[in-house]
């Protein structure tokens, strides 16, 4: 289809904040110790505007988290951890 080739911003790089469709620039890898075992990680993507919002949301719940660049995420994260 025409228009499919300009894919420099795949949908999976969209910010995870509800209602936000900006391109993500960072990712937060986190887990909830009550429901995730210690090797499990969830990944949220965040645009520049929402990285602090999402991080604060998790920090308020004392969830372990790591903020990394999206480029690093793309090369280091197995596909089975990319669940929304
Ligand atoms: Zn956003």
Image (spheres, helix red, strand yellow):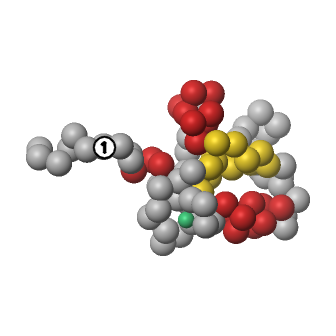
Q: Could you tell me if residue 42 is visible in this image?
A: no
Q: How many marks?
A: 1
- Front one among 37 and 41: 41
Reading the image, the residue beneath label 1 is 7
List x then y, in percent, for residue 25: 57, 51
Q: Which image quadrant: the N terminus?
A: top left
Estimate the x, y position of residue 45 in percent, counting from the top left: 58, 52
Q: In the image as oriented, which residue stretches furthest toward the right?
A: 62
Q: Residue at x 75, y 67 (%)?
A: 57
Query: Quadrant of residue 6 in the image?
Result: top left
Mark 1 CB near ligand 1 (8 Å cut) = no
| 34 relative position to 69: left or right | right
Residue 34 position (above or below residue 48)? above
Note whether residue 58 is visible: yes
Q: Residues within 10 Å of mark 1 (few under 14, many from 20)?
A: few
Query: Residue sitting at 69 percent across and 42 percent down?
Result: 68
User: Which quadrant does ligand 1 occupy?
Assistant: bottom right
Q: Position of residue 12 (x, y in %)?
A: 45, 47
Residue 53 lies left or right of residue 38; in this view the side is left
Residue positioned 72% across, 64% down in the render: 52
**Residue 67, image x, y percentages:** 73, 47
Depth check: give the residue in front, 43 or 50.
50
Compared to residue 19, the image places residue 63 above or below, namely: above
Residue at the outermost bottom position: 19
Secondary structure under tag 1 reads loop
Q: Residue at x 62, y 33 (%)?
A: 72
């Amino acid at each position: 289809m025409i228009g499919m080739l300009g894919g420099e911003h795949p949908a999976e790089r969209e910010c995870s904040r509800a209602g936000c469709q900006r391109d993500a620039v960072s990712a937060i890898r986190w887990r909830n110790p009550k429901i995730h075992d210690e090797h499990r990680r969830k990944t949220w993507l965040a645009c520049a505007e929402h990285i602090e919002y999402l991080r604060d949301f998790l920090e308020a719940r004392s969830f372990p988290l790591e903020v990394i660049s999206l480029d690093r995420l793309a090369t280091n994260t197995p596909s089975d951890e990319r669940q929304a």
